[in-house]
Image (spheres, rainbow, N blue to C red):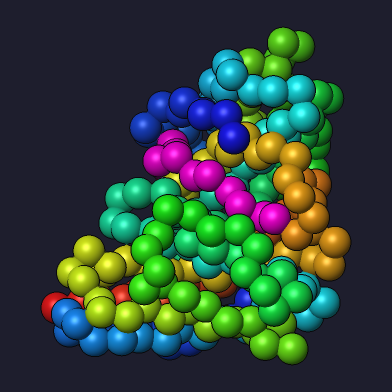
Amino acid sequence: DAKTTQPPSMDCAEGRAANLPCNHSTISGNEYVYWYRQIHSQGPQYIIHGLKNNETNEMASLIITEDRKSSTLILPHATLRDTAVYYCIVRAQTNFGNEKLTFGTGTRLTIIP
Amino acid sequence: ETGVTQSPTHLIKTRGQQVTLRCSSQSGHNTVSWYQQALGQGPQFIFQYYREEENGRGNFPPRFSGLQFPNYSSELNVNALELDDSALYLCASSPQGGGTNEKLFFGSGTQLSVL
């Protein structure tokens, strides 16, 4: 799986959009970009994933650049409950049933009241 | 709430002992994987079980072993505990079919302390 680079920490004001960048310059054509987050003392929680096109769900939006070498996770209206560590993960096409995720150290996002 | 439950939530052991951690996967999920998360680090993949067989393993020694049962629940066993085994152990399950386009559902983990 390709390596990802994320800033170690970010702050965002409550109610504003939080934009979390991720660099994955060695990504291959069949690798997906996944985002998970981990709130203190809990297991990681799936947020969103994509391959080429931008994606949006009830939690967030994922913007992937045209060359696929970087992406941005957008939380449109951040709340205090969004304070967490956010992991950007690039995941290769795997064999049937092989679910390995390679986590980095992520970005610690703090929402400021 | 993911439907993945782990037990116990906390455990204290001494060096050299053996430990068994348990995980019940979400209903309908037949793939279970285990991760180790040291303090301040991201989770590290230990291994995965699919249809009761190990199907993928990370860089962990053989003293880390596991089982998956017919109801898809799973156990992680660690023998000869070392101080560095102190970590949060996470279990994750995924739906039947697996593959890259499936998301993992994590439990809240077992915090293991080795003294």
Q: Residue furthest top?
A: A67
Which quadrant would the N terminus of chain A be assigned to in this image? top right
Location of residue B93 with respect to A29 vertically, above or below: below
Looking at the picture, how far across and down is residue B29, in whole percent?
A: 77, 73
Which residue does the image show at 61% across and 65% down from the upper left? B48
Between B69 and A91, the one lying in front of the other is B69
Main secondary structure along the magenta-highlighted residues: loop
Answer yes or no: is residue B27 visible.
Answer: yes
Which residue does the image show at 67% across and 55% down from the upper left? A99
Looking at the picture, how far across and down is residue A78, in whole percent?
A: 57, 41
Looking at the picture, how far across and down is residue A42, in whole percent?
A: 48, 65
The image quarter in which residue A88 lies: top right
Which residue does the image show at 85% across and 61% down from the upper left? B97
Give the residues in magenta: A98-110
Between B87 and A14, the one lying in front of the other is B87
For residue A69, side relative to residue B43 (left or right):
right
Q: Is residue A103 magenta?
A: yes
Location of residue A40 with respect to A107 vertically, above or below: below
Location of residue A12 with respect to A71 vertically, above or below: below
For residue A19, side relative to residue B58 (left or right):
right
